[in-house]
Image: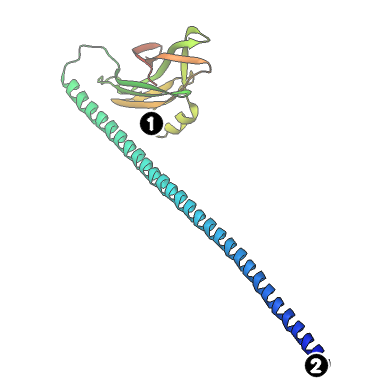
Amino acid sequence: MAARIFLLAVGIAVGATGSYYVTQNVVQRKMLGVENEQLTLLSEKVKQGELEIQALQGKLDAANAQMVIDKSTIVEFNRQVAKLQDEIVRSTEELLRYEQLIPSKSNMHVTVREFDAVKEGARIRYKVLLTRTQKQPAVFSGRLHFEAKGKMNGKATTVVLKPDSAVQNADNNKSSTKNASNGGQNLKFSKIELAQGLLVIPDGFIPENITLKVVEGKNTRVTRTLKLKS
């Protein structure tokens, strides 16, 4: 009897142990399955992140390449503009030499060789190339005066355009032109003068035409009018 009871107890113990290990194995398999699923999801997220990074890197490389191209284009444009300006000055100097060989029948104190004006936002960028062939006086002293015709509040009007003082003060170190007290631009040169800068457009004014006057003392020596470009 005691032996049977012992064997029964052993059987129960063995069965319980086996059931425990079976249960643990099932639990471990389930946990392993969950972990594998999580690892798969994480792996997919990592791959997706890598693809997004590659796409962003491609866009960044393209943007950097475009920036380099833009910078190179700007540098080239500036170089070409400077070259053209030098050619204009050289050509003008050559023209002046030929003109000096011809007896002058005119009483022109100064000549406008080039006048260009372009609207840039609330400013007008201008360029004026002046020459003179007279030997007396040796230096021309005068000023540039700019006026513009257009509309303000729907009505036709004419306004005096003044130089942008901030830009003009910076240009004064490179040119013999300076701001005049009346808002114009002083001139002092002997043969050739290339004046350029920005003019301020008054608030509410829509310019259409711009007029350049080269003034000496109280006399206007030459006038040039052109349609404003934008």
Identify which residue is drawn at 28% across, 25% down. 191
**What's the distance in space between the residues labelled 1 and 2, CA to CA?**
123 Å
Q: Amino acid at mark 2?
A: Ala
Q: Which mark is residue 53?
A: none
Between residues 204 and 18, which one lies in front from this camera angle?
A: 18
Which of the two discs, 1 and 2, labels the residue nearer the N terminus?
2
The spot of residue 55 in percent (x, y) is 45, 49
Look at 32% across and 36% down and name the residue there: 77
- SS for callout 1: loop
Q: In percent of the image, x 77 and y 89: which residue is there? A: 7
Residue at x-position 36% and y-position 38%: 74
* Residue 91, x across and y down, in percent: 22, 28
For mark 2, give the secondary structure: helix
Q: Which of the pair 17/130 is nearer the observer?
A: 17
Q: Mark 2 highlights which residue?
A: 3
- On the image, the x and y values in percent for residue 178 come to 43, 26
Give the labeled residue for mark 1.
Answer: 175
Q: Nearer the viewer, mark 1 or mark 2?
A: 2
Marks 1,2: beta carbons within 8 A: no
Residue at far top of view: 155
Q: Residue 93 in the image: state x and y as whole percent.
A: 23, 28
Q: Among all residues in the image, which is located at the extreme right?
A: 2
- Observer-nearest residue: 27 or 7? 7
* Quadrant in the picture for residue 70: top left
* Amino acid type at image mark 1: Ser
Q: How is the image coloured?
A: rainbow
Figure quadrant of the C terminus: top left
